[in-house]
Image (spheres, rainbow, N blue to C red):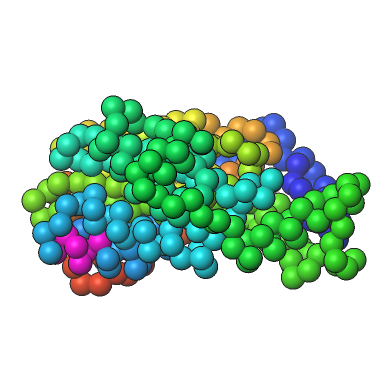
Amino acid sequence: MKLRWSRRGVLRAGAAAGVGLLGSRSAAALGAPAVHTRRAQGQRPLVISSANGLEACNRAMEMLEAGEDTLDSVIAGVNIVELDPEDTSVGYGGLPNEAGVVQLDSSVMHGPTRNGGAVACIEGIKTPSKVARLVMERTDHVLLVGRGAQEFARMHGDEIETLLTDGARLRWLEWKENLSDRDDWFPPSSGVGDFPEDDDFTSFYREHGTINCNAVAANGDISGVTTTSGLAWKIPGRVGDSPILGAGLYLDNDVGACGSTGRGEANLLDCCSFLAVEFMRQGKHPQDACLEVMRRVEHKTVDPRLLREDGTPNFSVNFYALNKKGEFGGANFRPSRFAVNDGSGSRHVDSAYLYER
Ligand code: GLY
């Protein structure tokens, strides 16, 4: 059943998207991006990222061209976005959980040392990707969470800072005050502020931003990083796909890398980045590997809450992959873009997709 927002409440719009709708998926178009995005492929060094990573790709490419390590390069790239208060999906300025607290997730993998590290639900640290790398390099563990992760960062000299910007706090407050007309939180006027009245819960109120960035160096070494503030207004303690190796990020230095943004819960159910790398190991082009993963997610999506009336998934999840040769590709359910830098500046390219609309 679709939830639709009115001034202070939720209207139920349309009939329930019920059982038996999956058959209509066959009507959906299978899309692939323009051929030119493939013609330019096979170059090293190469950096790819989610669409919010144009600057991150530029920074990472500069470092790769200067001969720096692949992981240092991609982390320096995503640090730009983690530290940007205007990006409300990553690091400082990220939208908080339902209690108004910013909790961050991040993971890194370093191909040459075949190692990885991650942090989840970490508070007060602007650049969780650096803490994930410290977990990898300075402990025998792979994943630290919550207070333990924060304390670990503090012991390595990180300052504990306020991550909630005024902009993010005001958006949280608007969400809180317009959540229900049967609670004790009132908006400042009878309206919903600047929110479009026809916006629905999934498209506007529940943002899943994230940045994933992967690189292959001239010598074929591969690294990747994923970092996020996760799902806006999430239940405190919720961990998404980003810090889970195999889901939000996975790579094998012999094969390639894959990372993800979007609805983490959908990715977690199939460890999709691991799956994409395994498809590449079997010989699939990165774009075809990502499309195959989208089909797997589609197959798993049977809950009517997550389906449009035509039976197709109502959420977004992106995969971005590259291989050791320097070929790359991305996929989503619907048309989408990602960022690429093959040495001639960062640009957006089209992802492959399953449905036109
Ligand atoms: N993909 C980011 C998240 O779901 O938290």
Main SS of the magenta segment?
Answer: helix
Residue 11 vs 279, above or below: the answer is: below
Decide: is 147 above or below 322.
above
Side of 240 where 174 appears, left or right: right
Task: Using the rendered image of the protein, determine whether residue 357 is visible from the camera's viewpoint.
Answer: no
Q: Residues in magenta? A: 60-65
Name the foreground residue: 246 vs 73.
73
Q: Residue 1 placed where, x, y %?
A: 75, 42
Between 7 and 142, which is closer to the camera in this rendering? Answer: 142
Q: Position of residue 132 (x, y in %)?
A: 35, 42
Which image quarter: residue 143?
top left
Q: Position of residue 20 (x, y in %)?
A: 67, 32
Q: Can the viewer see residue 87 in this picture?
A: yes
Q: Is residue 151 above or below residue 339?
A: above
Task: Name the residue: 15% across, 46% down.
Answer: 221
Q: Is residue 184 magenta?
A: no
